[in-house]
Image: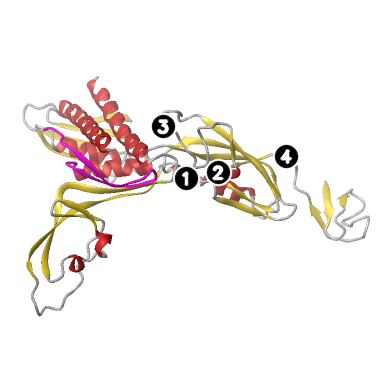
Amino acid sequence: MELTVTENLEQELRVEIAGEDHTFMNVLKGALLETEGVAAATYDVNPEQSGGQTEPILTVKTEDGVDPIDALKTAAQRVQEKTDAFRSAFEQAA
Amino acid sequence: MDEDYEVEFVERGDRKALFLVRGVTPAFANGIRRTMIADVPTLAIDEVRVIENSSVMFDEQIALRLGLVPLTTPPAEFDEDDVVTLSIDVAGPATAYSGDLVSADDMVQPADQNVPIIELKDGQRLELEADAVLETGKAHAKHQGGVSVGYRHLQRVEVVGDADEFEESEPNIVRGVVEIDGELVDTAEFDNDLTQKFPGKEVAVHDVEKAFVFHVETDGSMTVEELVNRATDSIESRALELEDAVSL
Amino acid sequence: MSYKCSRCKRDVTLDEYGGVRCPYCGHRVLLKERSTDIKEVDVR
């Protein structure tokens, strides 16, 4: 996983997450959309006219007063909460 | 928002299992599914040194067949760069099977003993050494641990009344596992046809939100439980990596 | 270069003067033997 920030504004973050695909990006996007203060979150693995760009680019837009980097951090923690919860639920059943 | 997940097994075997997960989002369910298929590494033969091959197949064809043999991959024992050497020496007339592979590591064995490699006639011989490496299904399908992994939305079936008496009856097909009166029922029990389960009744079928029935089959390189756990670990470690990266 | 005669199955060594012919039975079809070198194959 290699991060390259291409746009870092007060309420908008655009970051390339090299080495990932839909598997992780969609989980992350889902978690972002559940995160408080996130107005929009999306990713694109093959943006048009990008000259063969195939690494996913994540875009996060936040509401007033919320740092998109903080939102991304919260979402990453959220994914871990999900995996934790899933693991314990699975182990309980197994 | 607290995560409240619930897992319930419908069918449980080492290599094949069916289980219901409640509370997960479609994005998370799909993430787990895709990880099981493409991101959980397994061992598979990746290089072959042919000492003698007087069989009717080319070395490359034999190598391909050996690569496709599932090898047991115990969790947390191997790293991406580890190499396990196996060898095989069979003289005809006989058939060389995956079970004839002799591994240098007791933990790594062919998951099935009866995969035919090649039939050898009188005077033909196959002797070679092979290196198995750890890779993900993304790199090559021979490294896929989960070979049949998928899920269906759980559907709830309710009887809402009697069917129209003079209506031509048509089959009402559902598949997988459905919920009837709070019980999980395999639709194969009534031939996937709700009109057989509830003759003369009108039924309503609805998706149950955030409930998915997973069907997981492995190639034998690990058990279903190990596969699911390692898929979960894989997503978690990536989320942790991302968290660390943005925390700087 | 080691060959095997396809008719009498005997090992044949070719030199530059004899032409392609089995010195034992005169047969003109010779089969080339596989090298004893170990061959490395990438599994793809």
Q: Are marks 1 and 4 in contact (CB under 8 Å)?
A: no
Secondary element at tag 1: helix
Q: Residues within 10 Å of mark 3 (few under 14, many from 20)?
A: some
Label 2: which residue?
C43
Between disc 1 and disc 2, the foreground one is: 1
Magenta span contains residue B3: yes
Q: Are marks 1 and 4 on the same chain?
A: no
Q: Are marks 1 and 2 in contact (CB under 8 Å)?
A: yes
Label 3: which residue?
B75
Q: Are marks 3 and 1 in contact (CB under 8 Å)?
A: no
Query: Does the rendering let one see residue A22?
Result: no
Task: Give the alpha-carbon distance from disc 4 to disc 3, as whole Å.
Answer: 37 Å
Region in magenta: B1-25
Residue at (29%, 38%) from the top-left corner?
Answer: A94
Secondary element at tag 3: loop
Residue flagged by tag 2: what amino acid is it? Answer: Val
Label 1: which residue?
B142
Residues C33 and A86: in front is A86
